[in-house]
Amino acid sequence: MTRKQICHESYASGIGVIFFQGFWLGELVWQNYRPVGVSATTLATRGNVASGRVPAALDSRKPGFLKVDVIMIVVRILPVLLSFLLLAAHFSRAEHPALVLLSLMYPLVLLARRPWAVYAVQLALVLGGLEWVRRTVALVGERQQAGEAWARLAMILGAVAAFTFASVLVFRSVPIQRHYGLSADRTDRPR
């Protein structure tokens, strides 16, 4: 089996990982957004939406309602997922199948909802940003030696590196810190 075939196989399995992550995120939102013990049919049939009454199952004042803004947490970690996806594409182009799989599967560490998971992902993002900087310097040097245009390449890859570095800052938001047990208020920490 050639390196190219291995790379294509790892890319195909990486696409499966992306679909799994998408399914997992959708399931996470569904499980945490609907009220505890309320089925989808109950949500659809209870209450009269046309008259302006809110269904009892969706009333946040009821004791069984989960007040977890998982949708916003998923939206907030999208830059992290995109950074890892860009790294996977970079490693796929360089024909490093192991790094492609690692880049695609590494965000799954965030399922742990523990502080160590955040630190591990932040470290991986910093290393990913350094890889983008290293590759930018190498490609700019090659282009300069060949006498080709290099400014646009430097701007694009510099922006990708900056985006990857900026993705580390996602974990500084208060809801994310509460979600992963990083805030000073440890009452929301998962058990």
Image (cartoon, rainbow, N blue to C red):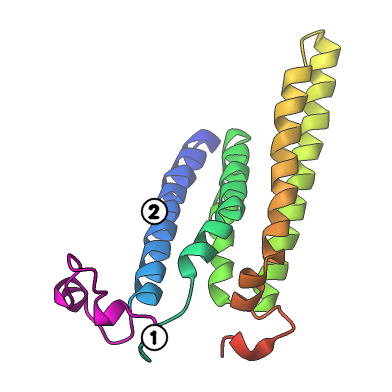
- Give amino acid for label 2: Phe
Q: Is residue 60 magenta?
A: yes
Q: Which one is in front, 134 or 162?
A: 162
Range of residues picked out in magenta: 35-61
* Element marked by disc 1: loop
- Give amino acid for label 1: Arg
Residue that lies at the very extreme toward the top in this rendered image = 147
Q: Which one is in front, 139 or 111?
A: 111
Q: Is residue 70 above or below residue 62?
A: above
Q: Determine crowd level at label 1: few under 14, some 14-19, many 20+ residues with C-alpha closer than 10 A.
A: few
Predominant secondary structure in magenta?
loop
Q: Is residue 168 above or below residue 15?
A: below
Splitting the image into 4 quarters, where does residue 25 fall? bottom left
Residue that lies at the very extreme toward the front in this rendered image = 51
Q: Residue at x 44, y 55 (%)?
A: 17
Q: In the drawing, does residue 189 fall left or right of residue 119?
A: left
Q: Position of residue 116 (x, y in %)?
A: 69, 76
Q: Position of residue 94 (x, y in %)?
A: 63, 35
Q: Is residue 182 above or below residue 167?
A: below
Residue that badge 1 annotates = 61
Q: Determine crowd level at label 2: few under 14, some 14-19, many 20+ residues with C-alpha closer than 10 A.
A: few
Marks 2/1: CA–CA distance: 35 Å
Q: In the drawing, does residue 59 fall left or right of residue 121?
A: left
Residue that badge 2 annotates = 19
